[in-house]
Image (cartoon, coloured by chain):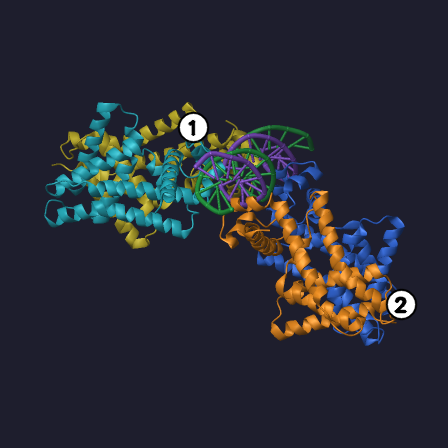
Chain colours: A yellow, B cyan, C orange, D blue, E purple, F green
Amino acid sequence: MGRVQRKRDERVRRIVAAAAEVFGERGYEAANLEDVAERLDVTKGSLYYYFAGKDELATAAVETLGTDWTERLEKLDTPGGAAERLRALLREHIAIAVREYPAALRLFLVPDSWPDDLRARIRELRRRHDLVFRRVVREGVAAGEFAVVDEDAALQALHASMSQAPLWCSHLAGDAQDRAMDHLADTLMKLVAPD
Amino acid sequence: MGRVQRKRDERVRRIVAAAAEVFGERGYEAANLEDVAERLDVTKGSLYYYFAGKDELATAAVETLGTDWTERLEKLDTPGGAAERLRALLREHIAIAVREYPAALRLFLVPDSWPDDLRARIRELRRRHDLVFRRVVREGVAAGEFAVVDEDAALQALHASMSQAPLWCSHLAGDAQDRAMDHLADTLMKLVAPD
Amino acid sequence: MGRVQRKRDERVRRIVAAAAEVFGERGYEAANLEDVAERLDVTKGSLYYYFAGKDELATAAVETLGTDWTERLEKLDTPGGAAERLRALLREHIAIAVREYPAALRLFLVPDSWPDDLRARIRELRRRHDLVFRRVVREGVAAGEFAVVDEDAALQALHASMSQAPLWCSHLAGDAQDRAMDHLADTLMKLVAPD
Amino acid sequence: MGRVQRKRDERVRRIVAAAAEVFGERGYEAANLEDVAERLDVTKGSLYYYFAGKDELATAAVETLGTDWTERLEKLDTPGGAAERLRALLREHIAIAVREYPAALRLFLVPDSWPDDLRARIRELRRRHDLVFRRVVREGVAAGEFAVVDEDAALQALHASMSQAPLWCSHLAGDAQDRAMDHLADTLMKLVAPD
DNA sequence: AATGAATGAGCTTTCATTCAT
DNA sequence: TATGAATGAAAGCTCATTCAT
C-alpha cells in the first residue's frame, strides 16, 4: 500500500468524519451534501470521486461512527466484577452519546427505502456493538451478580435509554449534566440487578 | 356547532390520521404531502384548505397522536397497588407503540428548525404524557413499593425503551411478539424495584 | 328594473369597490380573489356569480374607479378662467390620487396579456378622463392664457406626474402633505404657462 | 481576479441582463424565473447557482439597470449653460426609457413585501439617479436660468413624466417617436422656466 | 483530483377556477 | 344565491447527481 493509497485513505477518513457530523446533526433526509463538502472546504462534486452517492456516504458514516464507538467501548478495560465493568460501559456510552454524537439516534434511524445490503451492514454493526454489553451482562448473570427477566429485553432497554439520553441531557450545564448521566447509569444498572 | 362544522371536523380528523401515518412512517423530512393526499384520495392542494402547510399538518398529527395516546393511558383504570398500575401502563403503552404507531419515535423527532411555538406545544404534550407515568411512580415510591435512584432518569429510561420497542418487536409474529412485549414490561419494572 | 335587479346592482357595486381597493393596493398580479372576498365577508366562489373571472373583476374595478374619478372632476364646476379651472382640476386630481387611490398607478398598469376588448375599454376610459383636462388646456391656449409646446406631451406629463404623486406624498403628514400637493399643482401649471 | 472569476462575472452579467428584460416587461409579480432561464437557454434551477432567489435576482436587475442608466447620464458631458445640459439629460433619459427599458416603470414598482435592505438599496439607487438632475436644476436656479416653485415637486414631475413616456411613445414609429420625445423634453423644460 | 456549472426531478405552496349542494 | 370543497396548473426552490475541463 503506497503513499498514494495512504493519502486517499486519509482523505476518505476525513470525508466520512464530516459526513458523520452532518448526518448525525440533521438525520439522513435533512442532511445535504453541500454542507458536508463545506465542512471539508471542497465542493460537492468532489465527494463523488470517493463515494457513489448519498447512501454510500451515509452508510460509511454510520459504519465508521459505529465502529469507532464500539471499539472505544471494547478498549475500556475496567478491572473488577461484571457490575463494575457494566457500570463503566454504560457511563462511557452515555458520555459519548451526550458529548460527541448527540444526534446519533437520528443517524441510526436509516430510511426504510435503503437497499438490503446497506441495511444488512448496519444491522451487523449494531450486533457487534450490542455484543460488548451482552457479553458483560451474560457473564454477570452466570456469576450470579446480575439477574434479568430476559436478556434481549434488558439489552434493548439499555440501548434505547442510552441513545435517547442526549434528548434530555444536552440542555443541562456542566455539573448538572454529569450528575444526570451518572443517575442514568445507576438507574440502568437496576435493569440487571439481582432480585 | 352545525352539521357543516361537524363534517369539517371529521374531514380534518381523517386528514390528521393520514398525516400521522405518513409522518410516522417516514419522519418529518422524508414525508411528503403528495403521499398524505394520496392516502385520502385527494390532491395535494386540498390539504391547504385545512392546514396552512407541512409544519402545521405535522404538528396536528403529533398533537392528535400524543393526546389520543395519553388519554388512552389516563383512562386505563387498573385497580391495585402502584406496581400493578405501572405494569398495566407499561404494557398498554408498549402495545400501542408496537401495534398502532410503530414509527412514533420518528414522528416525535421534530426538526430543530421548527418555530418555537410548535416546539413548545410538543414539549407540553410530552409533559402531560410523562405525567401519567410519573404520578404512579411517585406514589409507588411514597408507598415504599418502589425505589428509584432518580425520578427523572427512571422516567426517561422508561419512555425511551418503550418508544424504541417497535424497532425490535415489529418483525416478530403473534405470540412471540406478545411475549417480547411482556418481557420488556417486566424488565422495565425493575427500574423502580425496591432494593 | 325591479327590486331584485337593484339589489344585484348594489351587490356588484360593493364587490367592485372591494376589488378596486385590493387591485389598487397590490397590482393585478399580486392581488388575489380571496382577499377581495374576505373584505366583503363572502367566499371566493361567490364572486363568480357576478363576475366571470379575475380579468373581468379587475376591468370592472378599473372602469368604476376611472369613471368615478372622471365624474368627480367633471362635476368640479369652478368659475373663472382656464387657469383657475385647470388649477382646481389638478389639485382635486392629486388629492384623490394621494388620499383615496394611492395605488391607482398600479391598478392602471394592466398586464399586456389581457384580451384586446378589455384593453380597449380601459383605453377608452383614459381617453374620457384625459378629455377633462384636455378641454381646459385647449380653451386656455385658445384664450391666450396658456401656451404649450405640444398638447399631447403636456397632458401626458400632467397625468404621469399626478398619478405618481402618492409615491412621494403618502408618507408625509397632514400639513406637509397639503403643501406638497399644492406645490405639485403649482409646478404643473408651469407646463402650460404662457411664454 | 482569475479567468474563472471573469467568466463567472460575465455569466452573472448576462443573467442579470435577461432578468432585467423579463422583470421590466412584466413587473416583479408577473415575471417568472422559467422565462428568465429560457432566454438564457438554461434551466430554472441553474439560476439558483448564481442568485439566492427571485428577490435577489430582481434586486440585481434593478440595481444594474439603475446604475447603468445613472452612469450613462453622468457621463453625458454637454457644454453650455444649465438649460442646455438639462435639455440633454431629459432627452437622453427619455430615449433610454423609450428605446431600451420600456417597462422600467414596472420594474421599479417593487412589492411592498420586500425586505428592508432591498428596499433601502433601491431607494439609494433612485437617490443617486435623482441627484444627476437635481444638481443641474439647482445650478440653473442659482444662475437665474431656472425658476422653480419647489425643487422636489419639479424633480418628481420630471421623473414621473419621463418614466411613463414609454406608455404613449412606444407605439409610435421612427420619426413620429423622435418628435414626441423631443416635444416631451421641451415641455418638461417649462417646469423650470424662469417667470 | 477537484471544480464549476448545469440539470432535472421532486418538493412545498399559491390560487383562479369549478361545482355539487 | 352563496358556500365549502376540491382541483390542477404553475410557481419558487432544493438538491443529488453528472460532467467537461
Find numbered disc 2 in the image and state the secondary structure of the residue it sits on.
loop
Closer to the camera in the image, C191 or C7: C7
Left or right: where D110 falls relative to B127: right
Is residue B163 visible to the viewer in this orientation of the structure?
yes
On screen, A54 above or below D142? above
Closer to the camera in the image, D84 or B71: B71
Name which quarter of the figure residue D86 lies in.
bottom right
Is residue C187 visible to the viewer in this orientation of the structure?
no
Which residue bears the numbered disc 2? D80
Percent of width and height locating residue B53: 46, 44
Find numbered disc 1 in the image and state the secondary structure of the residue it sits on.
loop
The residue located at (43%, 44%) in the rendering is B55
Closer to the camera in the image, A119 or A143: A119
Name which quarter of the figure residue A116 lies in.
top left
Which residue bears the numbered disc 1? A113
Percent of width and height locating residue F4: 44, 43
User: Which amino acid does the dot numbered 1 rest on?
Assistant: Ser
Q: Are callouts 2 and 1 both on one chain?
A: no
Crowdedness near tag 1: few (<14), some (14–19) or many (≥20) residues, C-alpha within 10 Å: few
Crowdedness near tag 2: few (<14), some (14–19) or many (≥20) residues, C-alpha within 10 Å: few
User: Which amino acid does the dot numbered 2 rest on?
Assistant: Gly
Q: Quadrant of the C terminus of chain B?
A: top left
On screen, B96 above or below C24? above
Give residue A32's mark.
none
Left or right: where D193 falls relative to C50: right
Percent of width and height locating residue A5: 52, 29
The residue located at (38%, 35%) in the rendering is B18
On screen, C51 above or below B95? below
Between the residue at mark 2 and the residue at mark 1, the CA separation in whole angstroms equals 77 Å
- The chain letter for the residue carrying disc 1 is A
